[in-house]
Image (tube, rainbow, N blue to C red):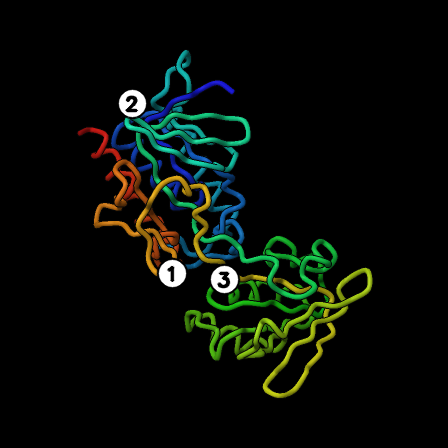
Amino acid sequence: MSLERCDIAIVGSGLTGMSAALAAYSRNPNQIIKIFGIPFDSNTAKKGEIENIPGINKVVGVDYVQQVITQIENLNAEFVKEDEPNKLEFINEDVTVITKNETHFQLITDSRNIKADAVIISTGLPELKHTIKGEDDFVHKGVSHCAVCDGALFRGKKVAIIGEGNFVARGALFLRKYCRKVTIICPNSTLDSDNRFLIKLSKSQNISFKYNINLESVEIFGSQLVEGVRFQEGEENKELTVNAVFVELKDKPDLTLLKDISLDITENGYIIKNAKNATNVEGIFTAGSISGEMDYIPILMGDGYKAGISVTEYLKK
């Protein structure tokens, strides 16, 4: 495994990380920037229709991700000569560990060993899996973790979606187009999503809600395929006949790849940053939901852009 180098390593290739790359590269196109991760695995790519980006009326998440990728590739082509290697490169692999010595950071993937002068952490919040009884038994047999990816496979069927927030609201609104009946199983007393989604959901005749459901009581059951879901509602044990269950839960930040670096974090595990997105470890910056930013695309993109500018200014010094 040969040692590569770059000026900036961006760990996380969602809209936050790509925005950081655009900012840093625009600020100084002589920098070598590597973006780690698979953009189409990002939360944005799984969001379905997006309507809160200023200047864009409506766009499907995966299409918008592709637009930003193309923008980055075009920007790279504008400044790189034919005989030069790419200055701005996507590496479609996850970083498994980051270490730091006196002069640089070292990032390891399955096939690469990279030396970087500065790092931006923008990995977002991972999906929370392996928490619902029966979930692991029926993956690809009626259990999915992406309503937008797999919803159309259950056209005309009854389905359930488990979770809360805008992500679940968007997923349910997507599923209603294809599925005969959509039941939202929410662990809290409210869905905690934007009111514009709640209004659409309440007007949808094929969507119903189950609130205050203890997720420990939920069980997905079936023989070879999903046949239903059981749960406790109040004092009653309930059972729904469904053909699919979409588990759309978000986990706390995963900082495993930074286990050898002592970052300051909040009580809830979010990375602490200052006004310039710098962490307590010199040379490491962070942006997006992993640092506690709200999960709204304009906010995440703006935070990433600010991190890209800040890291470029840091490297100048």
Residue type at mark 1 is: Asn
The CA span between labels 2 and 1 is 38 Å
Q: In the rendered structure, are the residues bearing label 3 and label 1 in contact, judged by CB atoms less than 8 Å apart?
A: no
Q: Position of residue 251 (x, y in %)?
A: 49, 58
Q: Residues within 10 Å of mark 1 (few under 14, many from 20)?
A: few
Of labels 2 and 1, the one closer to you: 1
Q: In the rendered structure, are the residues bearing label 2 and label 1 in contact, judged by CB atoms less than 8 Å apart?
A: no
- At a point 42% along the width and 21% down the height, the residue shown is 4
| Residue furthest to the top | 83
Residue type at mark 2 is: Asn
- At a point 28% along the width and 41% down the height, the residue shown is 281
Q: In the rendered structure, are the residues bearing label 3 and label 2 in contact, judged by CB atoms less than 8 Å apart?
A: no
- Quadrant where the C terminus lies? top left
| Residue furthest to the bottom | 235
Residue occupied by mark 3: 167
| Residue furthest to the left | 317
- At a point 53% along the width and 65% down the height, the residue shown is 168
Residue type at mark 3 is: Phe
Q: Position of residue 29 (x, y in %)?
A: 30, 26
Which sits earlier in the primary sequence, circle 2 or circle 1?
2
Residue occupied by mark 2: 30
- Dot label at residue 268: 1
Residue 178 occupies which quadrant of the picture? bottom right
Q: Nearer the viewer, residue 227 or 174?
A: 227
Of labels 3 and 1, the one closer to you: 1
